[in-house]
Amino acid sequence: MSALAAVPTTIQTGIINNWTRSRPSFTRGLPVSLDFMPYVCFMGILDATIGHNRTWTKLSLSYFQKISNCSRRWCEEAISTLLGENEEDPDTFTLPLIQRRKAATGGYEYRIVARPEGEVSGIAKCRDCGQIGEVDLDPEFIPVPHSYFSLPSACTPTEFLLVTAVMARTQRWGKVSKQIEVTPCQISIEEFQRATGKGRSEIIESLKNIESAGFIGSKPEGRTNWYWARPENFAKRILRAARAVKQPEKRRSKVETDKPPKQIQPVEPKKVICPVEFVTAPCGVCRNCHTYGPMDIVQEAAKKPVEQARAGPTPNGPRKPQFIQDLERRKQAAIADGLRRLG
Ligand SMILES: [Zn+2]
């Protein structure tokens, strides 16, 4: 990779116009709170629902296999972890982060459910249950190209988490330019360690790999390098060696081929994906049905002060949302319980 003469200032990535609105806590807190496969499957559901402007969507196990390049069994286990079903297994038990229901035509439909953060609220109509009431809205978001969600099929877990860490810190929606903008920032190895839970040498090695794959850019300066995401290259990934016996794919078909047939959800008319709609209609959590999804604002309610959306790390670290705090508490308790039983 050619080293640039200077750290670029904001880079506009105008060519990417199909992306998913991701909550910053999904890209910052979840990678360290969840194991790799549940995280990959969670993000896959986020992309298939929010990224396509709907709250429920039908997904097959082969969809999860395709984005992760992992075996069916791993995907099944990850899904049951996200559903909070593995209570008997203290290592994998979490609070439910997704819900699942039987689809009319067979198979399952999924949606994201997440605890409200309660930072900004408004009166909105939920697109899922239709109720008008107070909802917890996202104060900021990270625009994530659809191609990102298939990166686990090309990366090792550490590499994928590092791309996620760089993306979460440098990628924003340009309100004026109306496109994804990338603003380089300095990230220390220690911060990468906190963001991924991985060791120093593995991080340094993996950073080299994802830079040579073109997923991130970097520029050394003093003791802390500058980094920036290169989302325009996410789609150029090369499938890594499969972990399970799997037919090699000649050409990866788009995620869209997994769309359920049209008759499944007559309530939600198919819409063309329009990123601008995500900007005007923010995502939030319905207090009635707990769906996380785009909300149609009826009226803005009282706002508590919110920190401004900004590129780069927050000096004191962002406050962890309630659902991640709960998740970590349950996990700690489960580990302590497991140790007690062993000892
Ligand atoms: Zn609702």
Image (tube, rainbow, N blue to C red):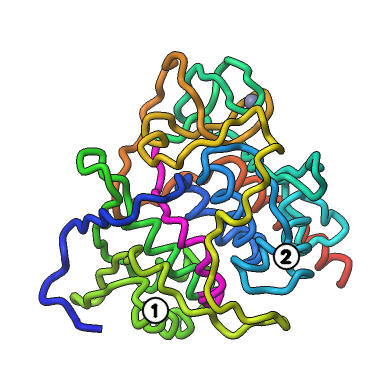
SS class, disc 1: helix
At x 36%, y 28%, the residue is 305
Which quadrant of the figure shows ligand 1?
top right
Label drawn at residue 207 = 1
| Nearer to us in this view, 82 or 54 | 54
| Side of 42 relative to 201 (left or right) | right
Res 190 quadrant in image = bottom left
How far across and down, in percent of the image, does residue 163 sit?
42, 68
| Side of 162 relative to 157 (left or right) | left
- On whether residue 144 falls in the magenta region, the answer is yes
Specify the amino acid type for callout 2: Cys
Label drawn at residue 257 = none
SS class, disc 2: helix
Q: Is residue 253 above or below residue 138?
A: below
Give the foreground label among 1 and 2: 2
Q: Is residue 84 above or below residue 336?
A: above
At x 82%, y 47%, the residue is 106
Looking at the figure, which quarter contains the C terminus?
Answer: bottom right
Specify the amino acid type for callout 1: Leu
| Nearer to us in this view, 123 or 316 | 123
How far across and down, in percent of the image, does residue 134 sit?
55, 18
Residue to which mark 2 is pinned = 75
How far across and down, in percent of the image, does residue 210 sit?
40, 78
Magenta range is 140-158
| Nearer to us in this view, 321 or 179 | 179
Alpha-carbon span between mark 1 and mark 2? 26 Å
Say if residue 315 shows up in the picture. Answer: no
| Side of 333 relative to 180 (left or right) | right
Say if residue 161 shows up in the picture. Answer: yes
